[in-house]
């Protein structure tokens, strides 16, 4: 009988075999342990994420059940109200304007490790790059701190904010953000935090919503991107032919990024709640029941992707759901893509002899958020 065992030994290292079995034998599977329906087909995942019969509310991270304070856990009309003040910072034009700064940070980080002959991709590149960029975008970086190391390794009294079923992300404590908010009240800045405060002044957001939105934007703006950069380097170094292609043709960074996002997404699953009785894949989902949309499984659905368990830069159309879909599609998807493209393209081009120090890597996280704890390489 098919089972879903995300807490079993070895699952974090490779959950995909279990996804294949579930998708083939019971794609809409009830998990007594999780009290969720587990969805592994691309069509079912996409339907639930787009359909208004399923809610994103009443799930972590939240302060109080039933009172969402961020766009992540809000349904209409609150979702649009909480998302609206942030959108202009994440348009295509805005991201394109940020690309030179992203490249500058990547270059500075890689220059720091040049003489050492080795690096930990996680600590030396994957974490500090997105953390620096989101810190600057929000306007929460410390004056005088080295720009490329701003907020690295959570030095501000950080806490783990739970993201559901064992997932969590590291963010500084509330006091850190509250101090940044007060600085912005005293002196107007041109940044994302100031955009949130303008919404508060216009009575579009409450002070609590400003604080929580800043915290979730900070966490989401770094955690998933960092994990994809590290896992992407790992997968490419285990496939020398693909690494060589990326090294020789920088334009492949775009296709490589999309394929790595599909192949091994850092966010493996998201949760939704049924607002009414719904039939899904021949199963009766009752009002109030929860559904786990397994993005990692949907991204390898053979009904949508040819040879889904292979990395293929020449895939062409790539309708992966790593950034979600529908109204909750990831706000920062464009920025994440820009950071990943720059990091991977520059790393492989700058260090053509890049190699893994060991194949014995450790995967950490949960069935929601999964990634490498470290990735030592020689340059």
Image (spheres, rainbow, N blue to C red):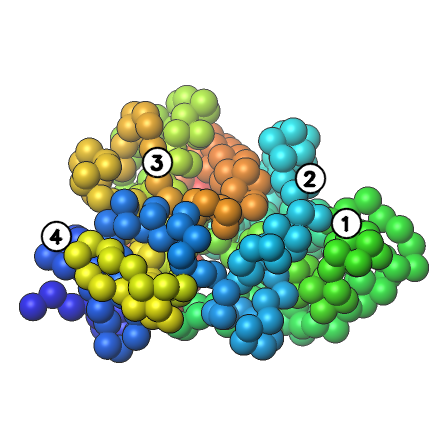
- Percent x, y of residue 335: 57, 40
Name, please, the residue furthest toward the left.
1
Tally the numbered discs.
Answer: 4
- Percent x, y of residue 306: 19, 33
| Whether residue 234 can be seen here | no
SS class of the residue under badge 2?
helix
Circle on res. 195: 1
Q: Alpha-carbon distance for marks 4 and 1?
A: 47 Å
Label whose residue precedes the other's in the sequence (4 or 1):
4
Label whose residue precedes the other's in the sequence (1 or 3):
1
Label whose residue precedes the other's in the sequence (4 or 2):
4
Q: Alpha-carbon distance for marks 1 and 3?
A: 32 Å
| Residue found at x 30% / y 75% | 35
Which residue is under mark 4? 24
Pick the quarter of the image with the N terminus: bottom left
SS class of the residue under badge 4?
helix
Q: Alpha-carbon distance for marks 4 and 2?
A: 42 Å
Name, please, the residue furthest toward the right.
186
Is there CB contact under 8 Å for labels 1 and 3? no
| Residue found at x 19% / y 61% | 283
Which quadrant would residue 107 be assigned to in this image?
Answer: top right
Is there CB contact under 8 Å for labels 1 and 2? yes
């Amino acid at each position: 009988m098919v089972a879903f065992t995300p807490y079993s030994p070895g699952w974090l290292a490779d959950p995909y075999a279990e996804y294949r079995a579930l998708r083939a034998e019971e794609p809409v599977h009830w998990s007594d342990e999780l009290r969720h329906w587990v969805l592994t087909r691309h069509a079912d995942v996409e339907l639930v994420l787009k359909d208004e019969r399923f809610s994103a509310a009443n799930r972590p991270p939240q302060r109080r059940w039933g009172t969402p304070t961020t766009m992540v856990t809000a349904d209409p009309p609150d979702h649009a109200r909480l998302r609206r003040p942030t959108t202009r910072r994440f348009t295509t034009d805005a991201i394109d304007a940020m690309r030179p700064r992203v490249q500058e940070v990547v270059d500075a980080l890689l220059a720091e490790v040049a003489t050492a002959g080795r690096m930990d991709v996680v600590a030396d590149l994957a974490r500090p790059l997105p953390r620096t960029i989101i810190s600057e975008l929000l306007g929460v970086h410390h004056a005088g701190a080295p720009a490329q190391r701003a907020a690295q390794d959570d030095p501000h009294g950080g806490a783990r904010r739970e993201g559901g079923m064992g997932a969590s992300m590291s963010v500084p404590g509330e006091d850190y953000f509250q101090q940044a908010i007060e600085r912005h009240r005293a002196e107007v800045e041109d940044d994302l935090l100031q955009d949130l405060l303008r919404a508060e002044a216009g009575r579009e957001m409450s002070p609590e919503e400003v604080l929580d939105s800043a915290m979730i934007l900070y966490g989401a703006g770094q955690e998933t991107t960092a994990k994809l950069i590290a896992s992407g380097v790992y997968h490419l170094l285990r496939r020398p032919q693909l690494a060589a292609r990326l090294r020789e043709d920088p334009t492949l960074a775009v296709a490589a990024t999309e394929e790595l996002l599909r192949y091994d997404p850092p966010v493996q699953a998201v949760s939704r709640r049924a607002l009414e009785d719904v039939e899904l894949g021949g199963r009766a989902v009752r009002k109030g029941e929860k559904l786990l949309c397994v993005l990692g499984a949907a991204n390898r659905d053979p009904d949508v992707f040819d040879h889904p368990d292979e990395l293929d830069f020449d895939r062409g159309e790539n309708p992966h759901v790593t950034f979600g879909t529908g109204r909750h599609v990831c706000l920062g998807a464009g920025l994440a893509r820009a950071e990943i493209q720059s990091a991977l393209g520059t790393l492989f081009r700058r260090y053509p002899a890049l190699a893994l120090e060991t194949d014995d890597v450790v995967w950490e996280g949960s069935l929601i958020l999964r990634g490498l704890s470290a990735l030592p390489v020689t340059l």
